[in-house]
Every structure is written in C-alpha cells, then in structure tokens.
Image: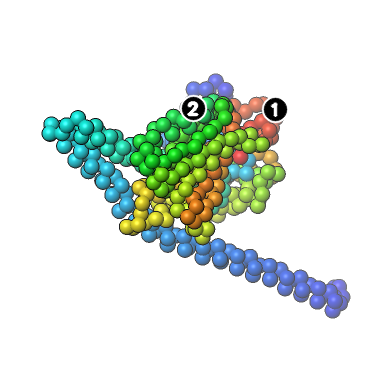
Amino acid sequence: MKDELEKIATHFLYPSNLYVSNQRHIITTILGSCVGICLYDTRLRIGGMNHYMLALWNGNGLASPRFGNIANEKLIQQVLQLGSAKMDLVAKVFGGANQTTSYNNIGARNVEIAFEMLDRMSIPVVGKSVEGEIGRKIVFDTMTGEVRMKFVQKSNTEER
Amino acid sequence: MHNISDQHLLDELKNRFDRNQQVMKEQHELLSQLEKINAKLVQSESVQSAFLSNIRNEINNPLTSIIGLSSEMTSGNSDKDQLIKSAQMIFSESFVLQFQLQNIFVAAELEAGQVEPYIVKVKVKRLLESTLESFQHLIQRKNIRVVFDAPDLVFKTDSEKLKTVFSNLLMNAIGHSPQGGEIKILVYRDELNNLVIPVIDQGKGIPTDKLERIFDRFVQLDTGTTKTHAGHGLGLSVVKSLTEFLGGSVDVKSKVDVGSNFIICMPEMIGSENSHELSTDGNEFVFDTDDMMI
C-alpha cells in the first residue's frame, strides 16, 4: 500500500480550500472543528474534497470556501463540471469535533450544514465520522473513494 | 396505569409550555437572522452591479491615461522635464492598475478555495519597509508623513500574503488620508507572540453603524461624485479573508473626523504536514466505497 501510494499524486488540503480532480489523487487533510466532505463519483471514479471552518457566510469578507454553504456548493459544482451526474455521487462527511478551544459549538453547526445541503441535493452520505472531541486526519483516494481516518490530538497537528 | 395527581399534570403542562416558549424564542431569533441575511442579499445584488460599472472605470481610466501619455511621449515634441513628468504619471497609473488587478486575482483565488500557504521565515521589518518604499510615490504625492517602527524579528508566515495584506491597508490609509496627513504604523509582538500591525490614518473616519459593512465585498462607503478614493471595494475584504486564512484577525477602530485604526493580529504559522501516510498504531479507520460506518 505504501509503495503504491507513493506513485500517486498527493494533495494536502488546507483549511478554506477545496480540491477536485479528474486524475487520481490522495487528498490529505486534518480536521478539528472544521468539516470536510469527500465527494465521490462511483461511475467516473473521480472525486474531490472541501475543508471549511464555519457553517455560514454572513456576507462579511469574501465568499470563500471557508464557509460551509459556499464550500459545499462549490465542491458539488466542480465535481459536476468534470462531467459527473448527480445520481452517481456519494459523500462521506468528517470532522466537526467540539474541542475545548471552540465555542458556540462550531463543530456541530458545521456538521449540520453538511448533512442539510447533501440531503437537499439528494446526495447520499455513505460514511461519516463526525463530532466528538478529538480531531481527525483524513486521507481520501479520489479514484477508489476510500477514506482512511485517524483520530489525532491537537498538540501534534495544525488542525483547526 | 398510574394515578396522575393534579400537581403532576400542572408540572407537565408547565414544562411543555416552557418548552414551547423556548422553541418560539428560537424561531424568533432565526427569523430575525433570516431577515438580516435577506437584507444583506438584496444589498449585495446592488453592490455587485455597481461593481461592474465601477471596475470598468477603474481599469479603463488608468489605461486611457497611460495610452494618452505614452503616445504623447512618442511624438517627440516634449522636453526632458515633460518626459519625466509623463513617465512618472505612467508609472503611478500602472502601479495602481496592477495593484487593483492583483486584488481581483487574489480575491478570485480565495473564493475558488485555491490559496495555499507558503510558510517561510519572514524578516518582518524588511518586508514592511520595502512595501512602504514601493508606495513612496503615492505617499509623496499627498505629502503624507509616515511614522513607522517595527522590531527586528523573524516571523514564520506567508510573506506574499502578509505583503498583500499590508499593501492593502497602506493603500486604504493613503487613499483616505488628507493632504499632509500622517500615517502611523507601529508594529509589535503581543504577549501571545502574535504579530500586531496597526495602521492608523487621519482620514474621515467611519461611522459606527457602518463599521461592520466595510469588510464586505465591493463596498465603498464613499461613492458617487464625493468619492475621493480609488478602488472598487475589494481591498478590505481581501485583507480580512487573507488575514483569517493566515489564522489571524483584523479589527478596526474609527472615529468620525479623527481617523481610523486598522489592526492586524496574526499568529506565527507552523510548518505544514504534507504526509499522506498514517501511522500504524491501531488508531485507523477505513471508510471503503460501500462501507457504511456510523
């Protein structure tokens, strides 16, 4: 597995970013109270992922994928632009931990908007690991749709 | 079947009533939030259309003067002084144009979610000084006095983004400063080791009720014929989004007729973990294609 992974293009996904590709990529990210959705096309075997920090954009600053409502829409849009049909898409949702440093239960609100928007778009959620108190490291293979996840402590990562 | 006493019944009724009240209250709050967002949406529609006509002027006008000035220069009728003056004007017009185009690109990248941090050790003082230097021609034109001080420190952050943030704050301060005004930039590191960059100007100031709007996209408080400041209202939203991208925050204090103080506060960034491997200490979960793990 390790040797195999080394040949595949990798991408580290930073907070407020999203990454979609029609080439096989291993996308890695670290989530604390943030949420990341791994969107996968089961027919074309391509996918993408976002990593947002807050649930809703309030009109302040730029309409960037730092916000769930923007990030989710953009992710779905970009995958559709690569030729996917909505009926082939499945999603896996991760993150939204309620860490001691976060207030207002940011994590739970991030998770809520993910499920709500996926439901509205009729995209089934086929895997999830959300909320709790510990951060997660996510490794997503865009060709197989497989996601590997590990719980991580805040101290040794740069999760948000 | 239990016997329910009147007291029990009353308690239960009260409970349910309280819960109902609570739900009503939450609904009220949600409704007022919705109304707020709706108002904002309506507003954003109108600013977006204003943006388009605005941006045409902002890009067309400098280009027109650059073309005019340079064609005059090539005619060969100007003397040396005139040539220098024209060249200076071309320089500052194209400087502003480039600055604004760069902002549009940065904003587009941020909105597309395609901005990656490139963390290096930054000599903050040198970076800020060289940025200030590049704005000298604008500063001189308005005869502005700049008070600048920064500690000699090496700070881990994204130097390009820090530069963009600082440039925008400077552009904003210069634009709103009166002739002969003063801009004060006294950089320091706070007790939490954050880098703090306050940029204080002596501009017209911002009324309190408009403070929360200044970071919105395409918003310029000063519009129409009274507009004294170039740009199309992207600068401060870029400042806000980039600063937040670097894990920091931007704050503004302002007093009408006294001036504004924009304060950037950002933490030192840590190097990024680019590894795609997971350690094998047993704490690993696989979410396969058909796996439904809840």
- Residue plotted at (48% across, 32% down): B128
Residue B281 marker: 1
Chain of the residue under label 2: B
Instruction: Give the residue type at disc 2.
Output: Arg
* Total numbered circles: 2
Residue A58 appears in view: no
Q: Mark 2 Cα within 10 Å, few/some/many (few <14, many 20+)?
A: some
* Numbered disc 2: secondary structure: helix
- Residue B7 in the image: x percent, y percent? 85, 76
- Residue plotted at (70% across, 44% down): A100
- Residue plotted at (73% across, 70% down): B18
- Residue B20 in the image: x percent, y percent? 68, 71
Depth check, front residue: A129 or B274: B274
Instruction: Give the residue type at disc 1.
Output: Asp
Residue B84 appears in view: yes
Depth check, front residue: B212 or B74: B74
* Numbered disc 1: secondary structure: loop
- B274 w.r.t. B214: above or below: above
